[in-house]
Amino acid sequence: MARGKLIVFEGLDRSGKSTQCERLVSYLTEKGVPVKHRRFPDRTTPIGQMINNYLQGQTEQEDHVIHLLFSANRWEAVPSIEADINAGITVIIDRYYYSGCVYSAAKNNPSLSLSWSRHPEEGLPRPDLCLFLDISAEDAAKRGGWGEERYEKQELQDRVRQLFADMRATDDGSDFVTINAGQSLEEVASAIRQHAESCIEAKLDSSPLRRIQP
Ligand code: NYM
Ligand code: MG
């Protein structure tokens, strides 16, 4: 049986990831493609609840500690992601390790560089496709809804966007597709469908799921 694919959505807060992720999941489901929708942070687990409390400002965490909790929240899902993919299910995830690295590195903590932040992610399943919904922090802020959680500030989001660009240039850049998230909902959805369908149809069938390399 052909394995499922791993498709990830990334972008700033209010870039439209969640909406577009849901639309892609419904579209593929209607077409009869077996898909599973996940998101990180997964706030439903005990680790996810710690992350949620931190994001909502109810608790404080040292920068490295919260970074490692976000990473642990991905690692605890790996057995289930792998089982789905091996069962032929395409897994579509709203945020993944790129967010893990860039939001932590955007804090400008001198001992938490982008390269440090990536180490705990080594060995995670590597996406077959990463759809980056690109929008400026200024335009994202205009959409409203910022300010409820930690990190939802223009200055930090500006750095996050720059760090996403740095990662795209140096990391597994070939997995990345940048989509202009400033277009209409319909235009964005159609660009996403095109890339996702060609990824799902690609003959990676015999190739095992790859890993995030050091
Ligand atoms: N975030 C998300 C991180 O800082 N590290 C991570 O590893 C992940 C997955 O959590 N501002 C940040 C980015 C967001 C916040 O995510 C909550 P969402 O998708 O807005 O629920
Ligand atoms: Mg958010």
Image (cartoon, grey):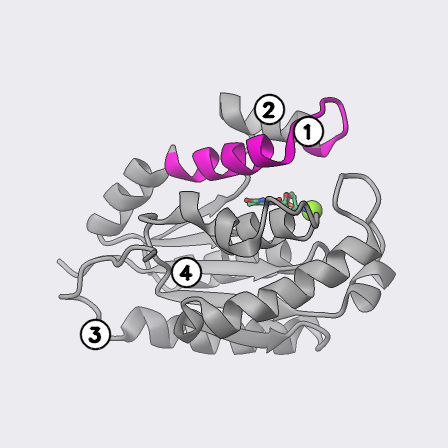
Q: Which of marks 1 and 3 is nearer the N terminus?
A: 1
Report which residue position mark 4 lands on: 7
Q: Main secondary structure of the magenta part?
A: helix
Rounded to the nearest whole Å, what is the CA distance between mark 2 and mark 4?
26 Å
Residue located at (83% from left, 59% from top):
141
Report which residue position mark 2 lands on: 50
Rounded to the nearest whole Å, what is the CA distance between mark 3 and mark 4?
15 Å
Q: Can residue 44 be spotted in the picture? A: no
Question: Is label 2 in a helix, a strand or a loop?
Answer: helix
Evaluate if marks 4 and 1 touch, with contact meaning CB atoms under 8 Å apart: no
Numbered badge on residue 54: 1
Evaluate if marks 2 and 1 touch, with contact meaning CB atoms under 8 Å apart: yes
Q: How many labels does the image show?
A: 4
Q: What stretch is highlighted in magenta?
A: 55-75
Q: Which amino acid does label 1 sit on?
A: Tyr
Occupied quadrant, residue 22: bottom right
Report which residue position mark 3 lands on: 203
**Relative to 148, is 208 on the left or the right?**
left
